[in-house]
Image: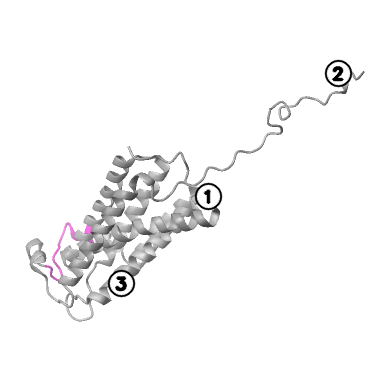
């Protein structure tokens, strides 16, 4: 008969019903476009697209401010002075090549530090597609300001900063788990704040008409949600992952 001393030693690993302890699987990265926000942001993107197309058709080939532009302000080459000129120039710098590059690098670095590679790809793709769309529209519409060659519609600066704010808000929602109401409010508030700030700077400095700023703002609203959906779809297909069931749903 075998004694108890012949039995294998009991360890913390073998004491568990499942055998040796295994590391739990990594938690899937949350989607960039939460399911709870897809309908509302999709409708917003569709409406923004209509505004971009309508304004582009209305001001195609024009070189003067329209009725709405004159009602807001009559742009000039130098329409803002102290103490507001410095803030306007600082905001405008964020849309210039150097300032924009700094923002993008900071955003991508932040995503990687938070272990959000999907979000890092989203930032790069979102900026590229938004700026690319604005540039293409400028050549298609052909609206100018302060002479031939100064294409103005839509405002690329406004589109860029709005896109950065939108992407930051979407990444924050995925990390914090906000629901539909709070998440939608955060996204729209971020887009409105960034668009209003850059739009004001561009109009105040005489670089764009007010309707150019509206067009740039709507360009970002149209492109960024579509980019988030596309990156989610391609990433999930490549990795074979499914949406995290713990992602907040509508509430």
Residue at left 18%, top 57%? 84
Q: Pointer 3: what residue? A: 135
Query: Magenta stretch?
Result: 75-88
Q: Is residue 36 magenta?
A: no
In this figure, which colouring scheme has been used for the structure?
one colour
What is the quadrant of the C terminus in the image? Answer: top left
Contact, CB < 8 Å: mark 2 with mark 1? Answer: no
Q: How many neighbours does mark 2 have within 10 angstroms: few (below 14), some (14-19), or many (20 or more)?
A: few
Please say whether residue 207 is visible from this viewpoint: no
Nearest the camera: 176 or 25? Answer: 25
Q: Earlier in the sequence, mark 2 or mark 1?
A: 2
Nearest the camera: 78 or 230? Answer: 230
> Mark 3 to mark 2: distance in Å?
80 Å
In the image, taking residue 186 as reference, residue 109 lies left or right, namely right
> Mark 2 to mark 1: distance in Å?
47 Å
Q: Helix, strand or loop at disc 3?
A: helix
Q: Helix, strand or loop at disc 2?
A: helix
Q: Quadrant of residue 12?
A: top right
- Place of residue 176 in the rendered image (x, y in percent of width and height, measured from the top left): 40, 40
Please say whether residue 125 is visible from this viewpoint: yes
Nearest the camera: 50 or 93? Answer: 50
Residue at left 10%, top 69%? 66
Q: Helix, strand or loop at disc 1?
A: loop
- Place of residue 77 in the rendered image (x, y in percent of width and height, measured from the top left): 15, 71
Q: Is residue 84 magenta?
A: yes
Q: Pointer 2: what residue? A: 4
Contact, CB < 8 Å: mark 3 with mark 1? Answer: no
- Place of residue 13 in the rendered image (x, y in percent of width and height, measured from the top left): 71, 30
Q: Earlier in the sequence, mark 3 or mark 2?
A: 2
Q: Pointer 1: what residue? A: 241
């Amino acid at each position: 008969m075998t004694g108890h001393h012949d039995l294998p030693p009991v360890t913390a690993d073998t004491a568990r019903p499942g055998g040796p302890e295994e590391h739990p699987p990594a938690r899937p990265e949350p989607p960039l476009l939460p399911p709870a926000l897809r309908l509302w942001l999709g409708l917003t993107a569709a409406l923004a697209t209509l505004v971009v197309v309508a304004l582009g058709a209305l001001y195609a080939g024009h070189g003067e401010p329209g009725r709405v532009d004159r009602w807001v302000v009559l742009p000039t080459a130098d329409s803002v002075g102290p103490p507001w000129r410095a803030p306007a120039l600082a905001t405008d710098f964020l849309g210039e090549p150097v300032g924009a590059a700094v923002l993008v690098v900071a955003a991508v670095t932040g995503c990687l530090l938070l272990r959000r590679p999907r979000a890092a790809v989203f930032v790069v793709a979102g900026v590229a597609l938004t700026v690319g769309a604005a540039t293409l529209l400028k050549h298609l519409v052909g609206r100018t300001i302060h002479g031939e060659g100064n294409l103005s519609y839509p405002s690329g600066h406004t589109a860029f900063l709005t896109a950065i704010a939108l992407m930051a808000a979407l990444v924050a929602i995925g990390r914090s788990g906000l629901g539909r109401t709070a998440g939608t409010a955060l996204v729209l508030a971020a887009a409105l704040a960034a668009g209003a700030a850059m739009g004001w700077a561009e109009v105040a400095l005489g670089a764009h008409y007010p309707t150019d700023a509206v067009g740039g703002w709507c360009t970002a609203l149209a492109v960024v949600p579509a980019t988030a959906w596309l990156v989610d779809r391609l990433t999930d297909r490549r990795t074979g992952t499914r949406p995290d069931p713990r992602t907040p749903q509508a509430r």
